[in-house]
Image (tube, rainbow, N blue to C red):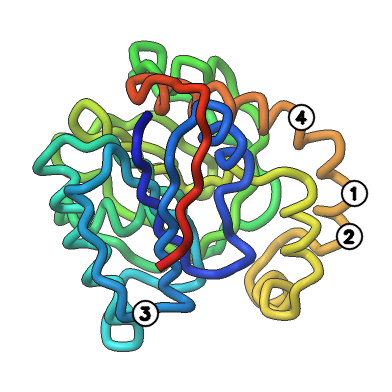
Amino acid sequence: MAKVLVFQHVAAEPLGILDPMLRDRGHRIRYVNFHRDPGAEPDVTRYDALIVLGGPQMPDQLARHPHLAVEMRCIEQALEREIPLLGICLGAQLLAHALSARVRPMTSWEMGWHDIEPTHFSAADSLFCALVEPQPAFHWHGYTFDLPQGAVHLARSAKCENQAFRFGPSAYGLQCHLELDERLINRWLSLPSYIDDLAAHGDQGTETIRAATPGLIGPSTTLGRALFGQFLRPLGTRKSRHVLPSR
């Protein structure tokens, strides 16, 4: 049974399809919710894997969100110990920043459904070999990053060249949201702050995204389960299931 540490930043961005995948494998999940407890000081060395989820914060907002510095220290510790690490959206940006790559605003935000495509490195990667051709994925980000030195470039999109990467044997950063299911996407499309961001920065309207989602979510979650399943594979499986309370 593995112990998995999860950094969450807002209630609307949980583990999504990763949650039942972790539970079904019997892993123990420890949430650190930085929105609820911005002063948390987790010890990543006590865990077998680290998952850093998305959120509205930006890596250059350390003055406004001091917990981002704490998260990057934890990411650095996970990298030093080669603890499996998965960063999604903000999590990928923090991973890139911790690896000394430049993280910067995009000229045009990537929001809604946009294709991601494999690079010529994808087929040799244990996760991204599942991405064999361009396919739609859900996006919601206004920042991008340079590929960290020594990282393997695994996916791109028309708006975001560095869509996904691996560093070392088991640290992955993904800009797109393969963890989302249809329920979560519709939840985002009903929240005022998300609607405002889409109106200000998006090139797809709320109803356009909502109408496209039923036809695109199946292949997206299938890809997500394939990638995340390979990420979780080294952690093994157990029959017992435990979720520890947030702290």
Q: Residue furthest bottom?
A: 64
Give left or right: position of 85 versus 122: left
**Residue 75 picture location, percent across and down:** 22, 53
Residue 178 higher or lower than 73, as above or below: above
Residue 36 higher or lower than 28, as above or below: below
Q: How far apart are labels 1 and 4 at the CA level?
A: 14 Å
**Residue 33 picture location, percent across and down:** 45, 68
Q: Which residue: 35% across, 33% down?
A: 2
Q: Which residue: 44% across, 34% down?
A: 27
**Badge 2 density bin: few <14, some 14–19, many ≥20, Cα 10 Å:** few
Given contact means CB atoms under 8 Å apart, are the residues at marks 2 and 1 in contact? yes
Residue type at mark 2: give it.
Glu
For label 2, the SS is helix
Given contact means CB atoms under 8 Å apart, are the residues at marks 3 and 4 in contact? no
**Residue 97 picture location, percent across and down:** 23, 59
For label 4, the SS is helix
Circle 1 sits on which residue? 211
Q: Which residue: 51% across, 71% down?
A: 56
Of tags 1 and 3, which is closer to the observer? Answer: 3
**Badge 1 density bin: few <14, some 14–19, many ≥20, Cα 10 Å:** few
Circle 4 sits on which residue? 218
Of tags 3 and 4, which is closer to the observer? Answer: 3
Residue type at mark 3: give it.
Pro
Q: How far apart are labels 4 and 2 at the CA level?
A: 19 Å
**Residue 195 picture location, percent across and down:** 74, 74
Give left or right: position of 123 versus 168: right
Residue type at mark 4: give it.
Gly
Q: How far apart are labels 1 and 3 at the CA level?
A: 36 Å
Q: Which residue: 38% across, 20% down?
A: 236
Rendered image: mark on residue 38:
3
Quarter of the image for residue 234 reads: top left
